[in-house]
Image (cartoon, rainbow, N blue to C red):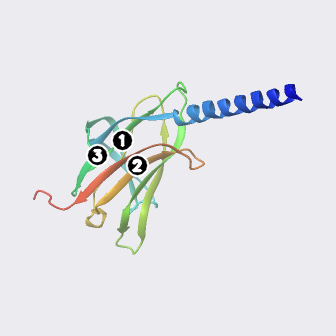
Amino acid sequence: MAHYVRYLVFLTAVMVWNTGLAEERQTSAVEIVDWGLTSPKEVGSEVSSDTPTGVNRLVEGPVDVTRTTKIRACIGTSFGVLYRTSGIGEAVLPITVVVFHPMIKTEDGRSMLKSSWPDSATSLRRYAGWVFERDFELVSGEWTISLRDLSGRELVAKSFDVTAGSCPIS
C-alpha cells in the first residue's frame, strides 16, 4: 500500500510539473517587445466589421515608439504594441488582435466595448495598435490590446490609460 501511495504522489507531482511547463510554453509563444505612442506608416486598409470605423489600417516597416502607457486621445494619435513570437522558430502563428476599450458609440448606432481583427505573429517584430480617426472614438479610460490565439485564449496583453480632451489645435 505504501508503494501505491508513493507512486500516486509521484504521478501527481509529475502531472503538476508538466502542467506548469505547458502553461509556460503557451504563455511565451508571443511577447510584447515595445509599447506606447507610435507613428506607423499606413500602406492600405481592409474592411473590418468588428471595428468602430469598419476599417483596419495596414502598416509596414519599422514603427517608431515612444514608450508610455499614458495616451492623450486626439484625432491622429496612434498607440500600440510591437510584438513577436518567442521560442517557435520561423513559424507563423495566426492570432486575433482584440482591443478592449470604454464604450464607443458609432455613427451607425453600434455600441462597442471591444474591437478585433485577424493578424499573425512571426519572429519579426509586428505592430498592433489604434489610431484615433473619428470624434466618437475619443473616450477616456483603460484600453487594453490583447493578442489571442484562434481559440480566444489570451497570449499577451498591454493596457493603456487613455484621456480624451486637451488636444492641440492643428
Quarter of the N terminus within the rendering: top right
Mark 3 and mark 1 in contact (Cβ < 8 Å)? no
Question: As displayed, is residue 56 above or below residue 1?
Answer: below
Q: Which mark is residue 81?
A: 1
Q: Which amino acid does label 3 sit on?
A: Thr
Q: Can you identify the residue that label 2 sits on?
A: 145
Q: How crowded is mark 3: few (under 14 residues within 10 Å), some or many (20 or more)?
A: some
Question: Residue 82: x, y in percent?
Answer: 37, 37
Question: As displayed, is residue 93 above or below residue 99?
Answer: above
Tell me if 120 is positioned left or right of 125 in this view: right
Q: How crowded is mark 1: few (under 14 residues within 10 Å), some or many (20 or more)?
A: many
Question: Residue 34: x, y in percent?
Answer: 33, 35
Q: What residue type is labelled 2?
A: Ile
The residue at the point 18 percent across, 62 percent down is 165
Q: Quadrant of residue 84?
A: top left
Task: Give the Cα distance between marks 1 and 2.
Answer: 8 Å
Q: Which mark is residue 69?
A: 3
Tell me if 95 is positioned left or right of 131 in this view: right
